[in-house]
Image (tube, rainbow, N blue to C red):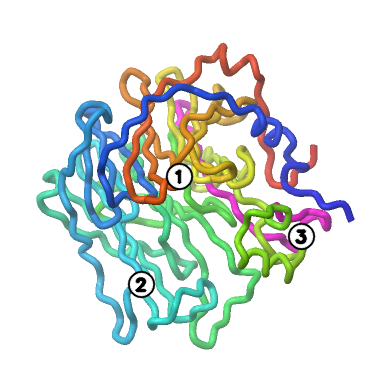
Amino acid sequence: MAFLTWDKYHPEVAQACKNIQPWPCEKIATGLAGVSQPSIVKDPKGQLFVAGTHGEVFHSRDGAESWALLCEAPALDPDVPAGLKVMALDSSGIGVSSEGTLLLPWRMAYNDGREYCGHEDETYHDVMWVTRSEDRGKTWEASPLLDPSPYDVIGGNQVRINEMSDGRLLVVETAARQPRPGKPLPKSEWKLWALLFCSTDDGRTWTHIADLGEHTDESDLLELPSGKLLASVRYQRKKLPDDPDELATPYYFDPEHDKDRCRECREYGPTGVGGHSVYKQSAVVHSDDEGKTWSAPRIVTGWLQQTGCLARLSDGTVLLPFGHKDEGHGQRVIISFDEGETWSKAVYELNKFGMYASSVVLGDDTIVTVHDSAGTGDSRGLHVLRWKAPPREEVSKYGFFEPRPAQSPE
């Protein structure tokens, strides 16, 4: 059998991945620690906010040139049922409403004390809530827990809260099914869904209104002038029974992956159903009905190029900066001039260390991107990039590609 990996089904993406163009950035090391998987938001006055992992809120009043600690928010965490123990408690993102309300999503994981074993642990719970402050962090109140039904657990990745033109606050967080006593979970259900939650009362309460599809995670939202909602998602999944027989995981052919992955490769081989991931990259989805339903994910980046975000310039240009770990670490960006229908065949290299690439656009179209220190030995330092997008004439000389769903034929 001839083994084929994702790139043979998406040659247009593979071609773009090989056309990496360096792009200048101003690089700022803030000296701030305690930030992992950072998200950045901007208030109506242009002030910038980033959350730390334990409730720290950092802010900048000068367009990200300098940063300071604004406050340390309490988790206001819910009670853990008797007999269970907390495994993780983190602030997992940030938002700021047009009213100036600071919003911090939180997640807490707990189980019976065993080591984390994911979908096999019937005692595992992961819950999420949002704390809010109307006085710049002096006092805080907590929302009720977000209800992920029909899924069992929610939380685990960084998110940011976005306000739409109609005043709704939207946030996307990842959920999964989990076994419970007497109710085992078949391996066919070992997957993730990115769930969309909405608040119409400035973050006091949240309602689950949609999901962005199977195998979606680490998502970001953008409202477009047309009214369409565009989202970037991490699309990651294992080989499925309906996949082409020859579809193989790139991990099998990568000599750098760790020994545990080698064991899994030996068990499943390169093309085994349920083996290593065959897709692990960024995709885009869109909604034409205010977020109620979403399109199938369309692949836009290469292998291990995931955790993207979305930003829009004043002329409507859409940017998708993303973190990567296929060649070390760093941040890159692809560009769309038609609301995400097509994307640049050139990939612009912004930086060569750190993961994640949460970005906002300032009033003069300067882009501010925040990331951590992955690849330097300390992943929890806050780093900032300030840059201008490549102009249309620069991007257009390489052309554009139209992304397709996973394994869509040419």
Residue 6 at x, y percent in the picture: 72, 46
Determine if residue 229 is in view.
no
Q: Residues within 10 Å of mark 1 (few under 14, many from 20)?
A: many
**Does 38 sit left or right of 397 as displayed?**
left
Residue 126 to residue 406: above or below: below
Residue 8 at x, y percent in the picture: 78, 42
Quarter assignment of residue 361: top left
Q: Residues within 10 Å of mark 2 (few under 14, many from 20)?
A: some
Residue 355: which disc? 1
**Does 116 sit left or right of 347 as displayed?**
left
Instruction: Say whether marks 1 and 2 touch (CB < 8 Å).
Output: no
Report which residue position mark 2 lands on. Answer: 87
Q: Secondary structure at mark 1?
A: loop
Instruction: Say whether marks 3 and 1 touch (CB < 8 Å).
Output: no
Residue drawn at 32 percent across, 74 percent down:
86
Residue drawn at 31 percent across, 21 percent down:
363
Residue 84 at x, y percent in the picture: 34, 82
Label 1 to label 2, Cα distance in Å?
Answer: 24 Å
* Quadrant of the image containing the C terminus: top right
Q: Reading the chain from its start, which is encountered first: label 3 or label 1?
A: 3
Q: Secondary structure at mark 3?
A: loop
Span of residues in magenta: 224-250
Quarter assignment of residue 222: top left
The three-letter code of the residue at mark 1 reads Met
Of residue 191 and residue 264, the one placed in the foreground of this image is 264
Of residue 143 and residue 50, the one placed in the foreground of this image is 50
Residue 270: which disc? 3
Residue 174 to residue 310: above or below: below
Label 3 to label 1, Cα distance in Å?
Answer: 27 Å
**Does 250 sit left or right of 219 as displayed?**
right
The three-letter code of the residue at mark 3 reads Pro
